[in-house]
Every structure is written in structure tokens, then in C-alpha cells.
Image: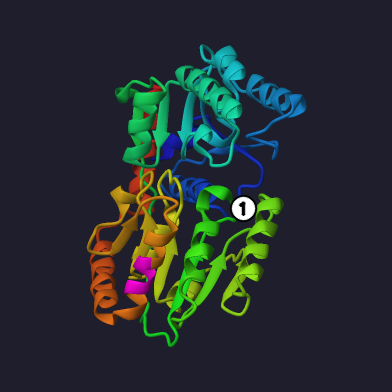
């Protein structure tokens, strides 16, 4: 593999690659695993204002691409690439652009319709300028083919890896409900709070682990909702944690009613710890969570979510069944080495 070190491969990532989100975690592990395989990629930082760049951020991205040698292989994280359509078209014949699409930008929740339409157009144009597209789930591959006119043979599926973990005991008294997600509208913490408000008569504690700075207005709204429902002694906002393994190990049920997931790395992590799961039937979630390991409810359906939570909180036999199903599913989760090998083969194919 020594010849790989001579391959000029660049990875453009907006903001701080050490940010504690699933997308950045994917980027970090991909870089590390490719390095283990003998390929060291040159990381180039883009402005942290993506996916809402100003002219300075776009000009900076263009200057950095202009500085790269002809025929370089360049992977660009979708958080930036989806709004770099004009730049991508300018460089498409000189550079070998690979898009890394965690999920389409237009599918972020809470966007005005006009902004959604603009993102749909810009991302379709950017993807058309790439030589290949890496996606993290079959669901995203389907969406790009159907709604963004990306030819299926241009799409490479590299599912996020999941490390092997010790299974949680799931014997909490009261049961601990764990949610791991940045506080954004798409993750639907509001739906979960409303559901939990219906379950005050049952014993439980809930822990919301995830960054609170992405949308401060939404974070404040969630905190106010908890206060209004008099749940401040039962729902704890934990914030970001560099290592959340103890949160999984001490949990009894993983619950996250996201309105859309490009893949859902937190769900895979929950499976790796053998946790029974309650989630919304949205995005890639149904492809990841087998019926033997979790309960899926319609998106944004407060009553269905409350009923499913009540079922697992009330009937320990059902909870144990799903716990065992999660432990079985954990054995079949792909590794990070698997993902890196897929991406490496793509890079080699594009390079020659």
C-alpha cells in the first residue's frame, strides 16, 4: 500500500472536524481508517458558516480548490458541497470531485419552502459536477437517484462503522431513557417531550445528550417546554460529551423520534450496546433498526410515541425481547474498516 501515500487526495471539511455530530464523527473515522490502510488524505478546512456561506466563505473555498494540482482527487463533505454548485461546475473538468452526502441539505427540518427549493437545485447541480457520490445509507442513495437525478452507478454506499461494545444491563430503577442527538428541529425532541408529558404517572428518567449551540432559539424552546410541563426533575439536558459510552451503558431504552435520518449513527451505537429502541419510521431508520430490536412509530405522532414508551416502561418482558433483538443485531453492524475499504477502492478507481 506504500504507493497510496503518493496519491494526492484532498478532503474539504467545513467548520471543525472535531465537532460532536454524526457527520463529523464519520469524517474523522474515515480519515483515521484510510490512514491505517496507507492513504493519508490532506484535510482542507472550509468556513464554519456552511451550509449558509457568505461570499467570503465561497470565495475562500474557490481559492483553495484553485490551489490544488490538476487531476487531484478531492472529497468534499456534503454540508458544504451542496451549496458549492457554481464552484463545482468551474472545477469539474480539472479536478476529480467526490461528494460525500450524509443526507441532502434540503431535507433539514424547519427550512422555509423557498430555501428548500434553492438547496434542492444547488445540490443537484453540484452532484452533477462530481465524478462520484459517497452516501451513508441505501435510503440516501434512493433519494439522490429519484429526486436529484444522480445515476445509480455514480453512487457508492459506505455505511458508517460501529465499534463493538459491552452490552448495557438495562436494569435501571427507574428506567433511564436515553436520547443522543444535537438539539435541532429535525431530531424532534419536542415530540418526545410532549410524549413524556403524558407519562408522568410512570417511573422514568430521561437524559438528552447532544450539542445545544446549533440552534439556540430551538434549545430555549425545548427547555421552556420541559419547564411548562413540569418535567425539569425528570428530563436532564446533558449537553455534548466527548465520550458517551457510559450514557449508553447506564441506559435502559434508547428513544429518538427524528423526522429524518441520513443514516442514524446514534441508533447504530444504541444497537451496539444492546439497547431496545423507539424511533420514528423516517429516512434510513427502518433500514437500520430491525423489528426484533425496536418499535417504529409515525413521524411527529406524539400519541403513538407515548403509547410505545408506556408499553416498554410497563411490560418488562417486551423490553427484554427487544434488548435481546438489539444484541443480535449488534453482531451484524458493519465496521469502520469496511467503510474505509469501500472509499479507498472508489478513490483508486477515480484516480486511474
Q: Give the range drawn in magenta.
A: 307-311
Q: In this view, does 74 lie to the left or right of 261?
A: right
Corner quadrant of residue 311: bottom left
Residue 164 seen by the camera: no
Q: Which residue is drawn at 52% across and 48% down?
A: 186
Number of on-image labels: 1
Query: Relative to the observer, which residue lies in front, 135 or 315?
Result: 315
Most extreme residue toward the bottom is 173
Q: In this view, does 348 lie to the left or right of 45?
A: left
- Residue 67 appears at what percent x and percent y? 66, 22
Query: Relative to the observer, which residue lies in front, 81 or 186?
Result: 186
The dominant secondary structure in magenta is helix
Corner quadrant of residue 11: top right
The N terminus is located in which quarter? top left
Residue 102 magenta-drawn?
no
Q: Residue at x 39, y 49 (%)?
A: 160
- Residue 171 appears at what percent x and percent y? 37, 85
Q: In this view, does 78 lie to the left or right of 14?
A: left
Q: Residue at x 67, y 27 (%)?
A: 61
Amino acid at each position: 500500500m506504500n504507493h497510496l501515500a503518493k496519491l494526492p487526495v484532498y478532503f474539504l471539511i467545513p467548520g471543525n472536524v472535531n465537532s460532536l455530530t454524526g457527520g463529523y464523527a464519520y469524517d474523522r473515522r474515515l480519515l483515521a481508517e484510510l490512514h491505517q490502510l496507507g492513504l493519508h488524505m490532506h484535510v482542507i478546512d472550509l468556513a464554519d458558516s456552511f451550509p449558509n456561506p457568505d461570499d467570503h466563505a465561497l470565495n475562500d473555498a474557490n481559492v483553495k480548490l484553485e490551489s490544488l494540482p490538476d487531476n487531484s482527487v478531492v472529497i468534499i463533505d456534503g454540508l458544504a458541497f451542496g451549496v458549492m454548485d457554481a464552484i463545482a461546475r468551474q472545477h469539474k473538468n480539472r479536478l476529480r470531485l467526490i461528494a460525500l452526502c450524509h443526507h441532502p441539505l434540503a431535507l433539514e427540518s424547519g427550512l422555509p419552502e423557498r430555501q428548500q427549493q434553492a438547496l434542492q437545485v444547488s445540490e443537484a447541480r453540484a452532484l452533477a459536477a462530481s465524478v462520484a457520490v459517497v452516501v451513508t445509507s441505501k435510503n440516501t442513495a434512493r433519494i439522490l437517484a429519484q429526486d436529484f437525478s444522480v445515476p445509480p452507478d455514480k453512487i457508492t454506499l459506505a455505511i458508517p462503522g460501529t465499534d463493538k461494545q459491552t452490552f448495557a444491563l438495562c436494569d435501571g430503577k427507574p428506567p433511564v431513557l436515553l436520547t443522543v442527538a444535537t438539539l435541532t428541529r429535525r431530531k424532534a425532541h419536542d415530540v418526545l417531550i410532549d410524549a413524556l408529558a403524558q407519562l408522568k404517572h410512570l417511573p422514568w428518567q430521561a437524559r438528552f445528550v447532544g450539542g445545544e449551540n446549533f440552534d439556540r432559539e430551538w434549545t430555549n424552546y425545548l427547555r421552556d417546554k420541559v419547564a411548562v410541563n413540569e418535567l425539569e426533575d425528570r428530563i436532564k439536558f446533558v449537553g455534548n460529551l466527548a465520550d458517551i459510552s457510559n450514557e449508553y451503558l447506564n441506559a435502559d431504552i434508547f428513544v429518538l423520534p427524528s423526522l429524518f435520518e441520513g443514516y442514524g449513527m446514534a441508533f447504530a451505537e444504541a444497537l451496539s450496546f444492546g439497547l431496545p429502541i423507539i424511533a420514528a419510521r423516517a429516512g434510513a431508520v427502518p433500514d437500520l433498526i430491525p423489528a426484533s430490536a425496536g418499535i417504529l412509530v409515525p413521524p411527529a405522532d406524539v400519541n403513538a410515541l407515548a403509547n410505545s414508551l408506556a408499553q416498554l416502561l410497563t411490560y418488562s418482558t417486551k423490553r427484554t425481547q427487544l434488548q435481546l433483538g438489539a444484541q443480535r443485531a449488534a453482531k451484524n453492524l458493519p465496521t469502520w474498516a469496511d467503510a474505509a475499504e469501500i472509499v479507498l477502492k472508489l478513490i483508486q478507481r477515480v484516480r486511474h
